[in-house]
């Protein structure tokens, strides 16, 4: 993994993450977003803006039960993203995950 540019904040940890948290991060430079696992407030709307988070390389969405394959599709536009954790995201299907893998073979996905 390449070193993060010094203008990129290393990591932000979201507690009880919601869509609004991601909307507020759009346009900001952040290398990694971690969550505390309380992700019931994250929906596809949050994933639609992930590509607007500058330099984002790692994203943890564990237990985000309200995201769907549609939202997962938005992540193919997040070109700097290198690692995605979607463990325990019950709204996702293997078909949706496979589609993202085919569009982004460079993206490491933990599911």
Image (cartoon, rainbow, N blue to C red):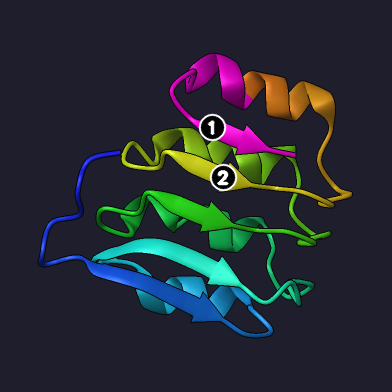
- Does the segment drawn in magenta span residue 105? yes
Indicate the quadrant where residue 41 lies: bottom right
Name the image quarter holding the N terminus: top left
Q: Residue at x 80, y 60 (%)?
A: 66
Disc number at residue 108? Answer: 1
Q: Secondary structure at mark 2?
A: strand
Indicate the quadrant where residue 8 lies: bottom left
Residue 40 percent location from the top left of the image: 79, 72
Q: Earlier in the sequence, mark 2 or mark 1?
A: 2
Q: Are marks 2 and 1 in contact (CB under 8 Å)?
A: yes
Query: Would you name the residue on which mark 2 appears?
Result: 84
The magenta stretch is 100-111
Q: Residues within 10 Å of mark 1 (few under 14, many from 20)?
A: some
Q: Secondary structure at mark 1?
A: strand
Residue 21 percent location from the top left of the image: 51, 79
Left/right of residue 24 with respect to residue 64 in the rendered view: left
Residue 81 percent location from the top left of the image: 40, 42
């Amino acid at each position: 993994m390449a070193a993060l540019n010094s203008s990129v904040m290393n990591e932000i940890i979201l507690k009880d993450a919601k869509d609004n948290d991601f909307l507020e991060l759009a346009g900001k430079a952040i290398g990694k977003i971690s969550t505390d696992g309380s992700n019931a407030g994250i929906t596809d709307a949050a994933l639609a803006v992930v590509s607007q988070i500058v330099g984002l390389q790692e994203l943890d969405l564990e237990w985000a039960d309200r995201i769907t394959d549609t939202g997962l599709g938005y992540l193919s536009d997040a070109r700097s993203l290198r690692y995605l954790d979607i463990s325990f995201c019950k709204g996702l299907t293997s078909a949706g995950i496979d589609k993202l893998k085919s569009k982004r073979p460079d993206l490491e996905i933990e599911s």
